Amino acid sequence: MQTPEGSLPSTSRREEDDGDLQALVAEAEGARSQKDADGEQKAYASLLIAARVEGHDRYTAEALYGLGGVLLRKADYEPARVVLSQAVTLWDTLEDEGRAAESGARLGVALHYGSDHGGAHVQFRRALDRFRALEDLKGVARCTSWLGILAAQLGDFEGALKHQLDTL
């Protein structure tokens, strides 16, 4: 875009695209606050498409994470597993340890409810390590609690007790 010397364009194309993507995030958050899972899912799906078209990796990862959460709440565990796996990978690529940990913990939940207890254990362990490195006590507590639940379901009551005590 040509502008007179010394002046800047008021809005770049990239900033306009970000505004459109931010509007989709706001739409998804609004739907969630209204407990409109279908509206939230639609908004995150639209965000995912738009972000991928525009090449915005952060918005893509956010859309995957949000969509995974909606799918979990709707008990649609296999699609949740797929999109959350993609979210973890993308947050890793973006080197965002906090978001990767959050996505990994959410992926652990999807795997747990999808009856992949071994996969859930792996994801909760990875997320736990990340949360500990970040000194995120809430994340640590969530992961140790889930690890305790998994251990109890697998008959490892000593391990379950250990994880539950770690949560305290």
Image (cartoon, rainbow, N blue to C red):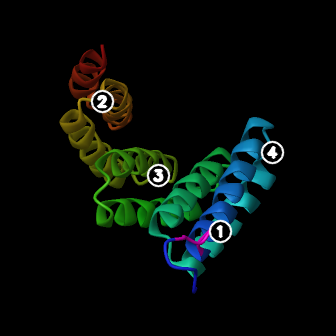
Dot 1: element: helix
Q: Which quadrant of the view contains residue 132?
A: top left
* CA neighbours of label 3 inside 10 A, class few (<14), some (14 to 19), many (20+): few
What's the amino acid at mark 3?
Ser
Mark sitting earlier along the chain (2/4): 4
Residue 50 rendering spot, x and y as whole percentages:
64, 73
Residue 97 rendering spot, x and y as whole percentages:
29, 49
Q: Which of 9 and 162 is in front in this view?
A: 9
What's the amino acid at mark 4?
Asp
Residue 159 rendering spot, x and y as whole percentages:
22, 27
Mark sitting earlier along the chain (3/4): 4
Q: Which residue is drawn at 35% across and 32% down?
A: 139
Dot 4: element: loop
Q: Nearer the viewer, residue 130 or 11?
A: 11
For label 2, the residue is: 136
Mark sitting earlier along the chain (2/1): 1
Above-or-below relation of 73 to 144: below
For label 4, the residue is: 36
121 left or right of 71 in image: left
Q: Residue at x 30, y 30 (%)?
A: 136
Q: Which quadrant of the view contains residue 157?
A: top left
Choose mark 3 or mark 2, whichever is in front.
2
- What is the CA distance from the residue labelled 1 to the residue labelled 4? 27 Å
Above-or-below relation of 124 to 18: above
- What is the CA distance from the residue labelled 2 to the residue labelled 1? 34 Å
* CA neighbours of label 1 inside 10 A, class few (<14), some (14 to 19), many (20+): few
Mark sitting earlier along the chain (3/2): 3
Q: What stretch is highlighted in magenta?
A: 7-12
